[in-house]
Structures are given as structure tokens and as C-alpha cells.
Image: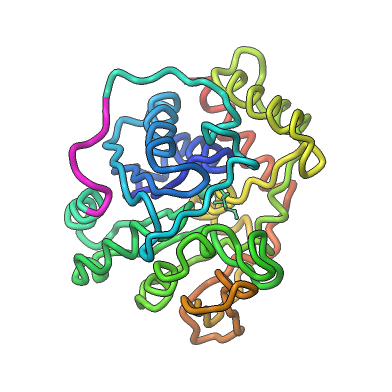
Amino acid sequence: AVPVVIDTDPGIDDAFALLIAASSDRLDIRGITAVHGNVPVGKTALNALKLAAFFGVDCPVAVGAEAALDGSMATMENVHGANGLGNVALPVPAKGFDSRSAVELLHSAAQEAGGALQVLALGPLTNIAAWLTAYPDDAALIAGVTLMGGSRGKGNMSRYGEFNIYADPQAANIVFDSGLAITMADLEATQYAYLKTDELRALAGEENPCAQLIGGLCDFLEQKGAEDGGKTLHDALAAACLIDPSLAGAVRARVTVDPQADARHRGQTVVEEDENGNVTILDKPDTARFTEFLRGCVERYEAA
Ligand code: BDR
Ligand code: CA
């Protein structure tokens, strides 16, 4: 199995990404690092800890950055609820947080994986940028970074900025300029990972331990009425394509982020198609295949 550290800000779609990653025997989750994002890091970290236990992942969970590199913080309670998980209450596990910081956990995981480490980054890129800055030699030990972020077209925060990049453009700039092998699930790709709540509810049968969690998240989405009551599972697409790249097409491009951009362009990923570019952008995933992939992941919890 491929060793991976998941950096995340759960987050409803982050929860689905963790469900997918935890269900797969192709991934060996070596750690989960929490970052500020959808809600403050105190909450994303607690959600990460609870979700790891809920999905049966036995790995260290470390607390990461509480703000962007420039000290700013953007949150999305309107989309993810005050607790970040659609106000669904999950049990608090007996096991607490790892004593290391997110950066130290990422550093040890890279050392231990001997060049094979994959990073799945599902929130603002603060922890990853801080890690690469603190331990530049670790870059040679990272086999790849799969991230959800950016957009080839419109943004969801500023006109062009997508949330994860918008929330820390300076960190994004460091990551995109790092020379690492980056795969990016941008908004143009993740729009195909939209499921209506009735489709989401149908993923888990009554006996499935995930049914209550998914049901609670759907209740929240329906009360909110946003996005037609359904949900674009942005982060889940990134996780799914790390496991099965055939779920989406791929476009090679040069991607840059200007950390000094004006308000209208804050968080914009400037994308030029280029065979020799620095990023592989996921392209036009098949919604039906993604849904069936997700169903397979959910069903594995029932069998377990
Ligand atoms: C991204 O922003 C967050 O709200 C989601 O969890 C996802 O990572 C989508 O723009
Ligand atoms: Ca996220």
C-alpha cells in the first residue's frame, strides 16, 4: 500500500475524502494533520480525530496551523456548519492528539517512508508550505502531492479564487513552486463530484455504520437548501483519484499563484496548458463512475 499523510480541514467533503481513504487497502495512512480552514483548527483537528476513529484508522493525528502564513484566516461555517461537520455529533475517541506538530509529523512520515510518501492535501496549504520551508530536504522524499484547490475558471470565494488557495495564497505559491509532482483537483473537475442528498443517503444501507453520519450530513445540507440540497464532494474526488487515477482525465499545465493579487484575483490559480508544466490537473471525471467508486468505499464499512 502507498504511504500517505492526509492534511485536512474537516469539513463535510473532507469527511467523505477520509471515508474513501480509510476504506482503501491501496493506501497506508501514516498520519492525519489538521489545518485551519472550513472552521478554526481547534475544530478541524477534533473532527479529524473523531473521523479517524469513526472510520477505524489507527494513525497519529496532529494539530497544525491556526492561520495562514500572513496571519489571516477565512472560514466557511455557512457551508460546513458551526462545528465543521454539519453539526453532526460524533463520539470523542479515547485516544488524543499526537504530541508533535503537523510539520513534525509530516517530517517524520517523509523520513520513514523513504521516498514513497504521498501527500493528500484537502485544505489551505499552510502546513505543507511550513513543512517545505522548515525541512527543504524533505522535498526529495515526497513522491507526490494530490491536492484539492484552485480553478481554471471561476472561483468560489473571490471572482477567481477557490477557497483552499484563497485562504492562504502565500502557502499555495510555495507549494506550486516547490518542484514537487502535483496533481490538482480544481473546481472545474470537482463540479462533476456533485451528488444530491437522496443519492448520498442511498450509499449506505440501514445496517451500515456510515448511515447515521451520512444521514446527519444530508439533514444539514437539506436544511440549508444550498446547492439544491446536494453537495459537491470536492475533496472526495481528490482522494478517489489518488486511489484510482482512471476516474478522471488529466491535463498537464503550468500553474502559478500570485500571493500579492488584488481582491478580485486573490487565490486565483493561473493555468496555462503546458506538457512541461508543474501540475497534472484532473479533467472531466465521470460522475457515475465516481458515485459507484464511493458506493464501493461505503459498502466496505458494512462488511467490516
Ligand atoms: C474546498 O474548500 C472547502 O470548503 C472544501 O472542504 C474544499 O476543500 C472547496 O473549495
Ligand atoms: Ca477541505
Residue 262 in the image: state x and y as whole percent: 58, 77
Q: Quadrant of residue 86?
A: top right
Image position of 226 (left or right of 185): right
Q: Quadrant of residue 213?
A: top right
- Determine the residue positioned at 39% across, 43% down: 41
Residue 196 in the image: state x and y as whole percent: 77, 37
In magenta stretch: residue 236: no
Residue 142 in the image: state x and y as whole percent: 30, 64
- Determine the residue positioned at 39% across, 70% down: 175
- Determine the residue positioned at 61% across, 51% down: 234
Q: Which of 100 and 212 is in front in this view?
A: 100
Residue 33 in the image: state x and y as whole percent: 34, 45
Q: In this view, does 1 lie above or below 90?
A: below
Image position of 115 (left or right of 189): left
In magenta stretch: residue 100: yes
- Determine the residue positioned at 60% across, 62% down: 162
The residue stretch that appears in magenta? 96-103
Q: Which of 127 and 42 is in front in this view?
A: 42
Provide the major secondary structure of the magenta segment. loop
Image position of 216 (left or right of 244): right
As drawn, the residue found furthest toward the top would be 207
